[in-house]
Image (cartoon, grey):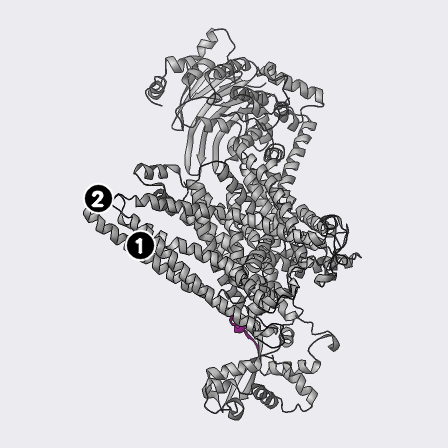
Amino acid sequence: MNHKNETPEQRKYLAKRHAASRRFRWYGLMGLGIALTTLFLLLGTMLLKGYSSFFQTQIQLSVSFDQTLVDPVGDKSVESLARGDYRAILGNAIKRAFPEIKSRDDRRQLSKIFSDGASFQLQNLLISHPEWVSTSQNVWLIASDNVDMWVKEVVDHDLPESQRRISDLQAKWLAFLEVNHQLQLRFNAMFFTSGDSRNPEMAGILGAIKGSALTLLITFLVSFPLGVASAVYLEEFAAKGRWADFIEVNINNLAAVPSIVFGLLGLALYLNLMHLPRSAPLVGGLTLAMMTLPTLVIATRASLKSVPDPIRDGARALGASPLQVVLHHVLPLAAPGMLTGTIISMARALGETAPLLMIGMVAFIMDIPGGVMDPSTVLPVQIFLWADSPERAFLEKTSGATLILLAFLITMNALAVYIRNRVERRW
Amino acid sequence: MGFSLIGTVLAIMAVLGFLIGNQRARGLARAGRLHSLPRYHGVFVALWTALPGLLMIILFAVFSTGMINSMVMENGQGGAGDPHMLAVELNKIQLIAEGRMPFQEGMGVSWDSVERMKNLHRNADILALFCVIAVGVVGFLYALRRIRTDFRARQEVERIVRVLLVVASSVSIFITLGIVLSLIFEALRFFAVVPVSDFIFGLQWSPQTAIRADQVGGSGSFGAIPLFAGTLMITGISILVAAPVGLFCAIYLSEFASPNVRGWVKPALEILAGIPTVVYGLFAALIVAPAISDFGGQIGLDIASESALAAGLVMGIMIIPFVSSLSDDVINAVPQAIRDGSLAMGATEAETIRQVVLPAALPGIVGALLLAISRAVGETMIVVMAAGLAANLTANPLQAMTTVTVQIVTLLVGDQEFDSPKTLAAFALGLTLFFVTLILNIVALGVVKRYHEKQ
Amino acid sequence: MVGKNVNYSFETMHLEASQNTTPPRVKMEAKGVDVYYGDKQALEKVDLPVPLNRVTALIGPSGCGKSTFLKCLNRMNDTVVGCRVTGSITLDEEDIHSPTVDVVQLRARVGMVFQKPNPFPKSIYDNIAYGPRIHGMTRDRTELDQIVEESLARAGLWNEVKDRLQEPGTSLSGGQQQRLCIARAIAVNPEVVLMDEPCSALDPIATARIEELIDELCNKYTIIIVTHSMQQAARVSHYTGFFHMGELVEYDHTEAIFTNPQQERTKGYVTGRFG
């Protein structure tokens, strides 16, 4: 072809090819854009909907702790204070704050702006401050979830009264309290220090976090030694042959088996065959350990594989036995890679939900688990449970718990990436 | 309960074994040259002391509860004949005995059975402790007798460690075996009540009608076709989203992006991949499904609030990083020399990628997509939260559909009826799911492996 | 074709003139070419005229910059991140870095054969047809068939593969693959063919075959070959440039380089004292 005196057709054809190339590049950029946009959309939504769960509406009341009501025995002991009538104390305090409210109906409406947990709150306060008996104190009390949603403007204030859960009268009182600085959005400590509850304003994630920690502990204790041992065997000892190939194919397939199938196995094996307790972190951990094991083996094998052979040869030449070669030379060198793989598998186990539903970790559990045999739930399942709740206020809790879970996961993954980039040795 | 005590005892015995073995070897060393270092003798004794006991503990853990339960039911008031009621009773007794449920009259279980179970458990613990100590001592004595100057303790220890490694590596096989056996076992019990053909070819899925164990078979319908259809639809939608987007991400990252961009975008995609499925489910139920439904309302389309479309879209988003990272690996494995060859011919970058790189990477990409499909088929939380329960047999993605995984969860969450076809159906579905994903995985991994070997 | 007479300062140029051949014209010319990889300078002030329809060999020890220089001539260095080329390189007196030059078209005019044979994972036929197709050189299948046959014939491969055109290019032997790559390069009818150690991965017989081919091809194409084998340079080339440590030490008629080098370093290299 004559390049120097190219024809207009040739020039046009060339331009067309360049345009196609640019277009193709754009498709790639668009794909990336879609992926990143959804990531930001997802994180953004959770942040927007969830951050408010770290705050809650509280109302300040002047409460007088009448000794006859709160301390029936009269010795200010914990046992005595625990038997006090805090409902009455709260009622009296409300009455004093709004002396003009007389009608029974209005009174009931008024008391409904406080959480059912407010009287428990008073009880706990007094048990930690026994010296308050027979005094008056200004105390911040939790508002009910409906009030919380109203104050956070999650519900539309302009809806007709019949369609909202805060009546005009209640709204008026709330406005009054707010003007007097007796109503504030304050840090929601309860969210981090209590277990699940039927009342959204009292529900917390500590139980789920502890359940997750216990479950993960079991998962780690079981899968890590087994995973490292099988990886070491397959990579360093096993003769290449049918058996090793079979185990390898088996592990690779196992790593791609849907997680819910492991849940079914957990149900059949641990609950139906071994009769271990339902909902226990022990069973959850064992189930997740079976799921994590293949991933862990694959990651560990990769890091063992990356240790160059001359190091093994060098150690062997000095008379080290095969086991000594592995223990003294290969494992220490492969440790950072193994650590990365372990952290990533643990993060995956932490975010796993489906198999735990199969073994009954989906029950409503208020208590914070103390050990691996106690019934408990885990963070992702807690999210699932709250997402299913009809109360509007649980929506915010769901997103809040999601933020906490994501924070854990992103920290773990970032740690893994850090180790991979900084500590891991490249050969 | 007892396991922590037994474990402690075992650990103490192992430490003692090590110390005594070590000491014995040192004593011998004064008489003549040892073949192995004294600490290997110690480890040898410790292993022989602890391992038999450990085996014992595992045996007890697996079998004791089951045996105790059957003993309780033999002697208790059970034997009413109905296995379903028996299991419920047993469950109650167990809960009360463990102190997890208060005892009340009129629960249908007697305090005697509870007492009996408590006693049996206590006896079992004592028996276990005794057995562990006994086998430990036997092992200890055996090992101690073998210590001599010419005893090759290091080789022996390494042999034992090797055996342990082999055992550890076969655990994964036992897991697979466990999955296959438990699924087949339970599924067979299901197929004893519901014919296989009804399950595979039936068009009607309404397990909820089978409320009690004695009214099943005829009335409950377990035709899984609507579930397969729903799974297929949602998987299809998700792949339609994930395949192009994920592939183009991979192409852009491996062929166009500067190292700097790659350094930022790859971790971002890893974050996307690390987000738990329950969060995607929440995203689908909270944001995507209402948005699609609203949008449909605006343009006059009737879209269900739990449409297959919403679930499929979000599942597609979930799979994007999966497709992209696998394809990225595959595309990067295409030798640079081939790219250079094409560029040196005067091909544009896009021509090089489309006509040389992608055809070369095609087997690997197909493998990656198969793995992605397998992932989508087995994905649970997104569909549980966003796809709904209605087993509609429809080709309209705007309607609610249900999937195999959703039904497994629905059938097994909440109060279970032991041995009812409703519960067993979950295992039949699980078996189907397992085999479908297994075939996809084997094919996909085979394709990918052969591809990497070729490069 | 446009070109100008090479204005050599070497007296060896007269050799060719005395043999009654027309003095070769310059097809490509590098003037003051510097190449940097990041902060590292890989080539320094290279001036080198490439004569039309001759074989020019670039020799020198590993890492001397000869391959780097070769890659400048069809701007393959563009694809290397952090690589910077300054100075002027002309093809028919037009600067190949000028904005009016399209790199895609430049590479069509300046083809390249690589060190290791790199056939595309396609059929033999598609390997050859790839270039003509992307450049839209043919109107129909017959024309394409013709180009494929011609190119394979010119690369001396036609008789060996004419019955197996649909088999993958990777099924050929190493030497055949390299000739396939040469056929692929000449299928787009380039003016210059760059060869980057084209025989280094081949056995002696295949090497001899390629060298014959180079000899035949230089009637039609201007060929620049990088080689680390001095014998090869002596066998196939008309002109030879000796690179050392990123510099073009000496450039002359091949015979002159090997029999009467002007520079100490050249002498040292061709007599085998280093390199």
Q: Over which residues does the magenta segment extend?
A: A180-197
Quick check: marks 1 and 2 in contact, CB under 8 Å? no
Q: Nearer the viewer, residue A330 or B63?
A: B63
Q: Is residue A238 above or below residue C257?
A: below
Q: Residue at x 58, y 38 (%)?
A: B446
User: Mark 1 Cα within 10 Å, few/some/many (few <14, many 20+)?
Assistant: many
Q: Is residue B185 above or below residue A22?
A: below
Position of B201 compared to B368: left or right? right
Task: Look at label 2 and name its amino acid.
Answer: Arg
> Quadrant location of residue A6?
top right
The image shows residue A28 at horizontal and vertical percentages of 62, 43
- Judging by the rendered image, the residue that carries numbered circle 1 is B18
Mark with earlier residue (1, 2): 1
Q: Is residue A185 located in the magenta-colored stretch of the structure? A: yes
Label 2's element?
loop
Q: Nearer the viewer, residue A113 or A41?
A: A113
- Judging by the rendered image, the residue that carries numbered circle 2 is B33
Task: Look at label 1 and name its amino acid.
Answer: Phe
Residue A261 seen anywhere in this rendered image of the structure: yes
Q: Chain of mark 2?
A: B
Q: Chain of mark 1?
A: B
